[in-house]
């Protein structure tokens, strides 16, 4: 889910997506909107966290760990403290009070936090409790909506699927009483292959008439989810070109490849996805959608087609730095994940050190290493100092944990799941 969709998801009605708004959208905010001065010390970013606090924190951790950065303990503690006793996370809440009936549980935030904690390899109880809650709110069709009980959508189902997979849950065993799985739900959003421009794409949800309308954001998320992966992908070699498979009995992998073929075709021209104008906006022409483009890059790389993402990476390197800086930690994290998935240098991405930029949005990391672990360019020796000037002890401990516990995305052959 793109940063933009994530931030707006609870602030606008789902009518914009062609669906009825879930009842939970109108529910009270998880907590009073804090002022910038009152933001928790461990939180990344300075914007109002009401709708994306847990999400942006989790994405920041995912991007940091894939680049061998160990976040500060107080930042991790803040995320842990956001979890309710049920195992669910809200988008953001005042953790000084226990969760109650007014706390709006958020499947996307919960799934993102589970993925982040898996990669950090700490607080396994947070992961297990989050997984238990996510399984308990699975819809009868096998998928998940943004909030418990709301209709399933491709983005939410994909990010939850990735969280379960990264936590080691056999996805084929996550079934409803009718035998439906997360893959069943994801495939229900897929458009068939054919001659049209939208062939192989995924819809966010069926529209009010039950029709599936291609949605690039949903397609990027669903490709990753249908691969059984999470939001952060390791750098791997490209394989054969994506093919759009026809038939009525496709595997989840084939459906994911269909989505990849749609993304490859869509990116082939301009090198970016477009953001349709918002209703009532002065700008009537579509604008480049940097967040969804970054997500599409990760999806193509995760499905074995990073060569098809090269043009989009070049476009992002040239145009997206200002967007990421203004967009805060989640936006910067998206670019880090896109760079890493394709072997680009996140510490010199179009001249910008995205890792340093991300680190600066929160507490100084406990440890960091340079250059980028997947950069193919000749680099300088690794710097074992932390961003706040501390020397090698914490870096050694952090890297030791990363390799010893197998948390790095570099060391894990599979992963994932996905943003706003």
Image (spheres, rainbow, N blue to C red):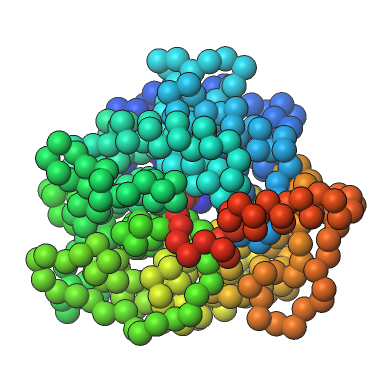
> Which residue sits at x=41%, y=77%?
305
Is 20 located above or below residue 301 in the figure?
Answer: above
> Which residue sits at x=43%, y=68%?
302
- The location of residue 223, given as percent across then percent down, is 34, 63
Left or right of 363? Residue 283 is left
Q: Quadrant of residue 100?
A: top left
Q: Quadrant of residue 343?
A: bottom right
The residue lying toward the viewer, choosing from 38 and 230, is: 230
Number of dots carrying numbers: 0
The residue lying toward the viewer, choosing from 65 and 244, is: 65
- The location of residue 390, given as percent across then percent down, is 89, 50
Is residue 159 visible in the rendered image? The answer is no
> Which residue sits at x=17%, y=45%?
180
Q: Quadrant of residue 130?
A: top left
Left or right of 234? Residue 193 is left
- The location of residue 334, given as percent across then percent down, is 55, 58
Question: Outermost residue, left direction?
Answer: 248
Is residue 44 visible in the rendered image? The answer is yes
The residue lying toward the viewer, choosing from 62 and 200, is: 62
- The location of residue 290, given as percent across then percent down, is 52, 63
């Amino acid at each position: 889910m793109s940063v933009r969709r994530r931030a707006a998801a609870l602030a606008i009605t789902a009518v914009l997506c062609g669906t009825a708004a879930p009842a939970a959208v109108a529910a009270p905010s998880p907590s009073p909107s804090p002022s910038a001065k009152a933001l928790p010390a461990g939180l990344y970013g300075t914007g109002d966290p009401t709708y994306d606090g847990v999400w942006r924190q989790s994405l920041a951790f995912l991007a940091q760990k894939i680049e061998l950065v160990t976040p500060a303990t107080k930042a991790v503690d803040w995320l842990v403290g956001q979890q309710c006793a049920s195992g669910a996370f809200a988008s953001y809440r005042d953790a000084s009070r226990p969760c109650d009936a007014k706390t709006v549980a958020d499947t996307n935030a919960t799934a993102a936090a589970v993925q982040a904690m898996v990669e950090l390899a700490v607080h396994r109880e947070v992961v297990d409790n989050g997984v238990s809650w996510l399984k308990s709110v699975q819809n009868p069709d096998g998928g998940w909506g943004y909030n418990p009980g709301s209709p399933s959508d491709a983005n939410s189902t994909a990010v939850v699927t990735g969280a379960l997979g990264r936590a080691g849950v056999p996805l084929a065993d996550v079934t409803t009483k009718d035998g439906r799985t997360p893959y069943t739900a994801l495939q229900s959003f897929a458009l068939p292959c054919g001659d049209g421009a939208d062939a192989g794409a995924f819809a966010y949800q069926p529209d009010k008439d039950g029709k599936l309308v291609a949605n690039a954001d949903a397609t990027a998320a669903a490709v990753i989810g249908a691969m059984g992966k999470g939001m952060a992908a390791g750098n791997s070699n490209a394989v054969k070109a994506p093919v759009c498979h026809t038939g009525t009995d496709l595997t989840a992998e084939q459906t994911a490849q269909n989505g990849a073929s749609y993304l490859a075709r869509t990116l082939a021209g301009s090198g970016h996805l477009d953001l349709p104008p918002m209703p009532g906006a002065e700008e009537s022409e579509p604008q480049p959608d940097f967040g969804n483009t970054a997500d599409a890059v990760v999806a193509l790389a995760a499905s074995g087609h990073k060569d098809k993402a090269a043009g989009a990476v070049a476009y992002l390197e040239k145009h997206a730095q200002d967007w990421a800086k203004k967009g805060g930690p989640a936006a910067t994290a998206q670019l880090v994940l896109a760079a890493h998935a394709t072997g680009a240098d996140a510490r010199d991405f179009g001249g910008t050190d995205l890792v340093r930029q991300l680190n600066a949005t929160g507490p100084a990391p406990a440890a960091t290493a340079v250059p980028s672990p997947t950069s193919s360019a000749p680099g300088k020796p690794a710097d074992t100092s932390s961003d706040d000037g501390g020397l090698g002890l914490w870096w050694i401990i952090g890297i030791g944990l990363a390799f010893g516990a197998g948390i790095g995305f570099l060391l894990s052959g599979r992963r994932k799941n996905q943003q706003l």
